[in-house]
Image: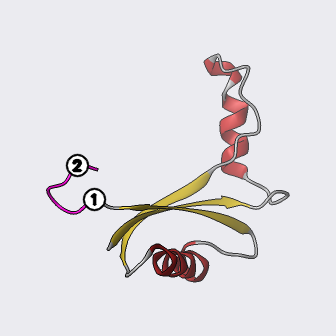
Amino acid sequence: MRFAARVEVLLRPGIADPEGATIERALPALGFHDVHQVRAGRSFRFEVDAADELTARRRAEDLARQLLANPVIEDSELVLTVQAPAGEPS
């Protein structure tokens, strides 16, 4: 089976986020006075071939932990969905 994975990586709470702070400071000048607590991050999307969802989840979590996120300063969140076979609607 093929699974689509999306990993969102954000700095942990308490870690300085200069990109998010810069965006937040610019918001009032653009008319966004009601937007607060901006955090910048990264998003990764990839596919995993695995026999079942548990195996795919473990593989994607290993990838996120070993390569995509620095666990000392970043948190990651995984969203995993089954891919429809080619020619079938999703």
Q: Are marks 2 and 1 in contact (CB under 8 Å)?
A: yes
Tell me which colouring the rendered structure shows. Answer: secondary structure
Residue 2 lies in the magenta-colored region: no
Find residue 10 and report its horizontal and vertical position in percent: 66, 58
Residue 86 lies in the magenta-colored region: yes
* The quarter of the displayed image where residue 4 is located: bottom left
Which residue does the image show at 22% across and 49% down from the upper left?
89
Which residue does the image show at 61% across and 72% down from the upper left?
69
Predominant SS of the magenta segment: loop
Q: Which mark is residue 11?
A: none
Find residue 14 and report its horizontal and vertical position in percent: 85, 58
Find residue 61 and report its horizontal and vertical position in percent: 56, 76
Mark 1 lies on a secondary structure that is loop
Q: CA distance from mark 2 to mark 1?
A: 7 Å
Looking at the image, is 49 positioned above or below residue 90?
below
Mark earlier in primary sequence (2, 1):
1
* The quarter of the displayed image where residue 25 is located: top right
* Along the viewing direction, whichever of 39 and 22 lies nearer the viewer: 39
Local crowd at mark 2 within 10 Å, few (<14), some, or many (≥20)? few
Q: Is residue 55 left or right of residue 47?
A: right
Magenta stretch? 84-90
Query: Mark 1 sits on what residue?
Result: 84
Looking at the rendered structure, the kind of residue marked 2 is Pro
Q: Which mark is residue 89?
A: 2
* Along the viewing direction, whichever of 54 and 21 lies nearer the viewer: 54
